[in-house]
Image (cartoon, grey):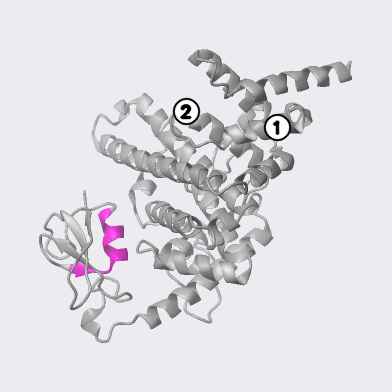
């Protein structure tokens, strides 16, 4: 009887693997049903093992379809499937329920989201092998992931701005429930896309770090830019993200610091701690070169308000602050040690980079942070700061630091040189 059950599961798995992306199926409902069925199959150990039992050629074809560029297809569902193959392997990714949520109800125990993670190292290996084949497979897939992450997180930020404004009005109870649901979905998608990036960079780090490949440097710079943007938005003091999380609105339960910061941390640790020294230095230089990099955002992960002075021990985290150290049941001691190592490394590297680029006079320093040289001029008022300070400021405020004029654009600035690059502040 048991053998017959397993054989039936395997046959159904073969059908789903073969047809979930079959271009001949034009019915939207049928396509969605097949995709949902495959997504459910990889949630549970018995059915996942059935997928692993189908012939290798069919498994590889299935994973190849999952890695196809995300444009013009139901990319969100295929991304969820990839995430489920990874859950249980990523940084702090062994939970069955996010730690900031309420305790699981007994009647919820069978929900897919609450199942103990059951990753598939076999299907992960197929993914790694496929990403290493040919010059176009990995770049097309990763550029689509990065594009969707940029879209999903930008949509999320736009929505929480609207929700926060609505919540401040007297009729706060009338925040649109559908808007809350879409907002939470964009947040969950952002987290899942970050996890797929973590899986990719763990399985095939050379896609980002082997710069003999023509697309690797560009992919790493795109990744660093997005990671810095996410970190700055989520970790800025008294920022929009904090305010909306504090509201605890029904429908936004999944929106919290932990899931997104742990996903970003997993990528950073893989880049800056776990790889060979030459690759770590390469990734460090790209991260620090991004104008949006803020060491404060990395300090935030361990509950530190400011970078610790060189040579001093890390102080105990403030209990009122977010800190990975507060989640010992979800993050192992080894993982926490890697984050501490990463912070120490970035603190040292950023200090060295700042020393190497010190301006010749104090008047060339950014008047906001006094840490970086002036590198940006605001239009139309002409005031100046470093790019890091103005980029951070423009996330929540469009007025000049100094004169309160509305900033229309920000231009690159070098002493004695003409500006050539302009970015909109809108």
Q: State the extent of the magenta-drawn residues as a range.
A: 384-394
Upstream in sequence: badge 2 or badge 1? 1
Foreground pick, 336 / 107: 336
Which residue lies under the disc numbered 2?
A: 73
Residue lying farthest to the front in this orientation: 134
Q: Quadrant of residue 101?
A: top right
Residue for point 11% across, 63% down = 403
Q: Residues within 10 Å of mark 2 (few under 14, many from 20)?
A: few
Q: Residue furthest bottom?
A: 360
* Closer-to-camera residue (131/401): 131
Q: Is residue 419 visible?
A: yes
Q: In x, y percent, where is residue 205?
A: 60, 56
User: Mark 2 and 1 residues: CB-CB less than 8 Å, in contact?
Assistant: no
Which x, y percent locates residue 405? 11, 57
Secondary structure type for disc 2:
loop
**Residue 387 lies in the magenta-colored region:** yes
Residue 59 is labelled as 1
Q: In which quarter of the view is residue 120 placed? A: top right
Image location (x, y in percent) of residue 40 = 64, 25
Q: Nearer the viewer, residue 312 or 266?
A: 266
Viewport quadrant of the N terminus? top right
| Residue 132 screen position, x and y as percent | 62, 49
Along the line of sight, the residue nearer the viewer: 28 or 100: 28
Q: Main secondary structure of the magenta part?
A: helix
Left or right: residue 176 versus residue 227 is left
Magenta span contains residue 6 = no
Residue at position x 63%, y 28% in the image: 112
Tell me which residue sits at (39%, 56%) in the image.
Answer: 232
Q: CA distance from mark 2 to mark 1?
A: 20 Å
- Mark 1 is surrounded, within 10 Å at the Cα level, by few (under 14), some (14 to 19) or many (20 or more) other residues, namely many
Q: Secondary structure at mark 1?
A: helix
């Amino acid at each position: 009887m048991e053998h017959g059950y397993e054989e039936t599961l395997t046959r159904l798995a073969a059908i789903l693997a073969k047809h979930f992306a079959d271009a001949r199926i034009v019915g939207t409902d049928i396509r969605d049903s097949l995709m949902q069925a495959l997504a459910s199959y990889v949630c549970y150990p018995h059915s996942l093992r059935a997928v692993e039992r189908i012939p290798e050629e069919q498994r590889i074809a299935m994973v190849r379809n999952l890695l196809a560029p995300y444009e013009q297809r139901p990319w969100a569902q295929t991304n969820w499937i990839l995430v489920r193959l990874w859950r249980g392997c990523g940084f702090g990714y062994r939970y069955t329920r996010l730690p900031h949520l309420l305790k699981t109800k007994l009647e919820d125990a069978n929900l897919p989201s609450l199942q103990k993670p059951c990753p598939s190292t076999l299907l992960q290996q197929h993914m790694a092998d496929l990403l290493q084949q040919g010059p176009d497979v990995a770049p097309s897939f990763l550029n689509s992931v990065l594009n969707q992450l940029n879209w999903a997180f930008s949509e999320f930020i736009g929505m929480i701005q609207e929700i926060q404004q609505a919540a401040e009005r007297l009729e706060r109870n009338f925040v649109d429930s559908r808007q809350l649901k879409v907002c939470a979905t964009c947040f969950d998608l952002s987290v899942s896309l970050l996890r797929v990036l973590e899986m990719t960079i763990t399985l095939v780090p050379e896609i980002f770090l082997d710069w003999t490949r023509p697309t690797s440097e560009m992919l790493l710079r795109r990744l660093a830019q997005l990671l810095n943007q996410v970190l700055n938005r989520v970790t800025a003091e008294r920022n929009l993200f904090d305010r909306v999380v504090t509201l605890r609105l029904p429908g936004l339960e999944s929106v919290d610091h932990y899931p997104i910061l742990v996903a970003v941390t997993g990528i950073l640790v893989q880049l800056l701690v776990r790889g060979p020294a030459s690759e770590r230095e390469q990734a460090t230089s790209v991260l620090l070169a991004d104008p949006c990099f803020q060491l404060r955002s990395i300090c935030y992960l361990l509950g530190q308000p400011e970078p610790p002075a060189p040579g001093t021990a890390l102080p105990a985290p403030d209990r009122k602050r977010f800190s990975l150290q507060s989640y010992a049941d979800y993050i192992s001691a080894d993982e926490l040690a890697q984050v501490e190592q990463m912070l120490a490394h970035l603190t040292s590297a950023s200090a060295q980079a700042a020393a190497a680029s010190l301006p010749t006079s104090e008047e060339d320093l950014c008047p906001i942070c006094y840490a970086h040289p002036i590198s940006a001029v605001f239009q139309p008022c002409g005031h100046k700061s470093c790019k890091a300070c103005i980029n951070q400021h423009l996330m929540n405020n469009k007025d000049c630091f100094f004169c309160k004029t509305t900033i229309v654009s920000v231009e690159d600035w070098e002493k004695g040189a003409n500006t050539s690059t302009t970015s909109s502040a809108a």
